[in-house]
Structure formats: structure tokens, C-alpha cells
Image (cartoon, rainbow, N blue to C red):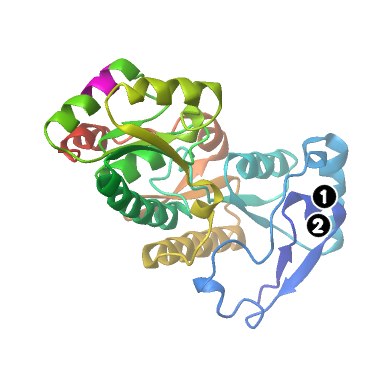
Amino acid sequence: GCRVTGILHGFRGMVEGSFQELTSRSVGGILRQGGTILQSSRCLEFKTDEGQERALANLRAQGIQGVVVIGGDGSMAGARALVRRGYPAIGVPATIDNDLYGTDLCIGVDTALQTIVEALDKLKDTASSLERAFVVEVMGRNSGWLALAAGVAGGAEAVLIPEREFDVEALALDARRARERGKPHYIIVAAEALQLATGPRGKAFMEAMERSGFTVRATVLGHVQRGGSPTPDERILATRLGAEAARSLIYGKWGTMVGVRGSDLVHVDLDDAINLPHPLDEALLELSPVMAL
């Protein structure tokens, strides 16, 4: 008996009054699509009191009694702003950085991980053929979760993340020793937060790695990580999180972010989800050098 309305372009659409009724037919078949049919954008106006008041007035004018906010830390901050004004809102984590606290996985992570590992497999073919080292930059604005998982799954020789310091000279020495052992390639996966594939820091890093004896090349995967048909695990996760968020709103439970821990769905305080760090998997950190044999 619920009416479902989509808000176009995220918080910008909320402020500008861009709404679209969603029916079973308008959302039929979208499970296999990447991205969002509602589209997304950044909205600086929503960060102001005036913008939030306009958004609330538009929501009430449409008869909308609660909002499911899907996105990363910025989206969760927007949900929190609505909650602080007494408006029912609940968050669903969707960011390939996987940097929201309280949930093991966010929507988008598994598909991005598959894309990265496929790219690493192909780059390793090229690197082995030409006897080169590659620095592969993956997304992770403040978090190394995606880089670490991709590095282990892709068998990278090194994983560099903002949560852990590294010594470029020691890394170059390790690459030299790998080359002396007959290894024809050396793959480094680096989170974008470190800026090791571009800019002045990237240039200095590449020059240092050249001392390994390998010719070094950089590959920035960029926005190719954000698209593609979702993996089966991703589709199941998104379905479970979305259903729990809708169910919670209907029964008056809001002001949280829905997450998953193990196989269980959980509700996470929005302040915690935004402000607390998402812990790295220490077991994966230990496995990373082992998988580089």
C-alpha cells in the first residue's frame, strides 16, 4: 500500500523539486544495470539551512513521509541532516571505497573489485611479456580497503594504502630481488589517496622504482571501476539492504544506516557510520605479501 517516489539527481532534486513516481514497471529489469536510473549529483545548496528547508518543503508537498538515502559518507551526512530536523530518513551504504563504518561491505564494492582484478590479470600478461613493473592506481580517496582486497585477489607484488607507511627504497630493492630471481613482472596496487601514479609525487615514486631494473609504467583505472553489470553477490546485497531500509521506514525505525556484518543485517548510528574509520582486514594485510610469491 506504499507509494514510491524517486528523487532525481539526489539532494539537488530534493532541493529543486525533481520527483518521479516509481512503479513496478518503471523499475522492472534494472537489477542487471550499473549506476543509478535516478542519476546523482553534488548539491552544495543542501548543506545550507535554506537548502534543507526547501528540500523538506518539497518532500512534504509531494506527500513523501520518509526517504531512503543511498550513497557514501556525503549522502549519509545528508540523511543525518534530515534526521536532525525530525524528518524520517534511513541510509543504505553504496560506495566502492567501502569506507563507511559498521558494515562489512557497501553496494558497488564487489563489482568494482571484479573489474580491478580483471584489469590486473590483463596487465600482468603485458608486464610479463615486456618485463615491466606497473603501478596500478585504484579508487580509495581516504581508504585502502579496495586496493588491499584487489591486490590480494590479483596476486600483486605490493599493495600501498594510506593506512600504512611504506619505504620506496625498500620496495625498489624488493622489486630488484624479484627480478634477479627471474620474475618477469612486478605489480603494485596503490590507492588513489597516495597519488603515486600521477603528479609530482607519482613522478618521484616512478623514478625511485626504476632503480629496481624494471621499466615502470603507471595505469590509472579511474571511473571504469564505477560501472558495469553488478555481480550476483552485489545484487543480493543491494536487495537485502534496500528491503530492510524500506521495511524499517514503514515500521517507524529510522535515523540509522542499514549495513551487513557477516550474514546479518544491522543498523548503524549515522554519526558512527560517517565519523568512525572502517577497519582494515588485518588477515588480508598479512596475506598480501604471501600472495606475491
- Name of the residue lying farthest toward the left: 181
Viewer-nearest residue: 223 or 281: 223
The reply to whether dot 1 and dot 2 touch (C-beta < 8 Å) is yes
Which stretch appears magenta? 170-174
Residue 23 percent location from the top left of the image: 67, 79
Circle 1 is placed at which residue position? 55
Q: Quadrant of residue 77?
A: top right
Residue under label 2, please give it: 59
**Residue 153, image x, y percentages:** 27, 48
Q: Is residue 145 above or below residue 241?
A: above
Residue, x 56% and y 74% (percent of image)?
A: 30
Give coordinates of residue 270: x percent, y percent: 56, 39
Mark 1 residue crowding within 10 angstroms, few (<14) / some (14–19) / many (20+)? many
Instruction: Answer whether residue 167 is visible to the viewer in this image.
Output: no
| Residue 146 image offset from top left, x and y in percent | 40, 42
Image quadrant where residue 186 sits: top left
Residue type at the position of mark 1: Ala
Left or right of 16? Residue 271 is left
